[in-house]
Image (cartoon, helix red, strand yellow):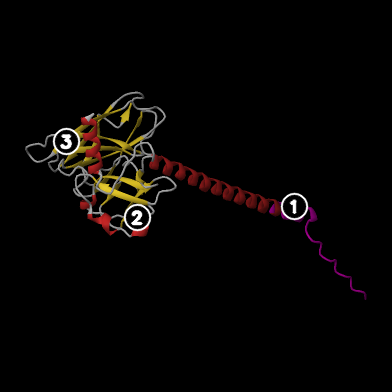
């Protein structure tokens, strides 16, 4: 019994002297970032906390280290669960949670939100081994290289950012670093787009610029959708131009045919009428 009371007391103290939590009464808060949780340095972002319909107040926390910017948010926005950052910096990155106040109780803390700031370092290079064209159902190896010595890499699949692959590595003695990821199996009906980032493990939420996009797909699909669309668009334009040229040639042919018919008719009239008869001179009467 004593260990249970000790745990409850510790939980209460960790939330602060004014925080009262009664598990099971209030649903857990929901925390998300708009437009995204991975934000380029200097861009605006808003953390939004949502509770039940009777929520009267919200709180936002950053784990391990307090965030001074939270205290600068206007009270009317805090009451709505909105915590905007006009221009994000490296200092704002971190792991956040929130809770709301309703019916004299504070809710449980939300699930953590990892707010990541990118653009701190130069972009790495992402390549596929042996090729980005993969047999359907097969796996492929992706290699992320950086000219700077980092000990952490992130493989980010576009459209599915909830569970990016993290990989720790050892930097090379010459100052560069590399991480090797394995992805797959490749679906025959889908095309995948990947980017990779590098970071220092001492600042896991501050990433480099993203690498160029690398597209993976099965052998029977093109790996450049933009190029395919442009080729289809070019084909449509060529088809229109060809149709116009054909119509123009047909019009010229019809005009030439009409000219020849009219000319033939005129020549036919001349042949049928014959040469004009000269008037006979009158005889002189004596």
Percent from the top left, x then y, of residue 67?
A: 23, 52
Q: Quadrant of the C terminus?
A: bottom right
Q: Are marks 2 and 1 in contact (CB under 8 Å)?
A: no
For mark 1, what is the residue? 268
Magenta segment includes 276: yes
Q: Quadrant of residue 161?
A: top left
The numbered disc on residue 78 is: 2
Q: Quadrant of residue 276?
A: bottom right
The residue that appears at 36% across and 43% down in the rendered structure is 29
For mark 3, what is the residue? 178
Within-10-Å neighbours for mark 3: few <14, some 14–19, many 20+: many
Percent from the top left, x then y, of residue 23?
A: 34, 37
Secondary element at image label 1: helix
Which span is picked out in magenta? 263-286
Q: Earlier in the sequence, mark 2 or mark 1?
A: 2
Percent from the top left, x then y, of residue 93?
A: 23, 48
Q: Tell me how far mark 2 sits from mark 1, CA to CA.
A: 98 Å
């Amino acid at each position: 019994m004593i260990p249970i009371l000790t745990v409850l007391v510790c939980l209460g103290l960790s939330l602060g002297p004014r925080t009262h939590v009664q598990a099971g009464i209030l649903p857990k808060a929901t925390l998300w970032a708009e437009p995204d949780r991975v934000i380029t340095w200097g861009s605006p972002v808003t953390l939004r906390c949502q509770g039940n319909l009777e929520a009267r107040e919200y709180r936002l926390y950053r784990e391990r280290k307090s965030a001074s910017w939270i205290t600068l948010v206007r009270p009317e926005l805090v009451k709505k669960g909105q915590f905007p950052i006009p221009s994000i910096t490296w200092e704002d990155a971190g792991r956040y949670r929130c809770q709301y106040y309703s019916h004299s109780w504070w809710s449980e803390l939300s699930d953590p939100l990892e707010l990541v700031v990118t653009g701190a370092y130069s972009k790495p290079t992402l390549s596929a081994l042996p090729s980005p064209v993969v047999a359907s159902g097969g796996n492929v190896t992706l290699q992320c290289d950086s000219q700077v010595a980092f000990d952490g890499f992130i493989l980010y699949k576009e459209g599915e950012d909830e569970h990016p692959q993290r990989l720790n590595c050892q930097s090379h003695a010459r100052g560069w670093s590399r991480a090797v990821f394995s992805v797959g199996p490749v679906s025959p009906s889908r095309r995948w787009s990947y980017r990779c980032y590098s970071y220092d493990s001492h600042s896991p939420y501050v990433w480099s610029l993203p690498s160029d996009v690398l597209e993976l797909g099965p052998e029977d699909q093109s790996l450049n959708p933009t190029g395919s669309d442009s080729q289809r668009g070019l084909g449509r334009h060529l088809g229109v131009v060809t149709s116009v040229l054909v119509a123009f040639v047909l019009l010229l042919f019809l005009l030439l045919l009409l000219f020849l018919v009219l000319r033939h008719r005129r020549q036919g009239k001349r042949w049928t009428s014959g040469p004009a008869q000269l008037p006979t001179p009158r005889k002189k009467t004596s």
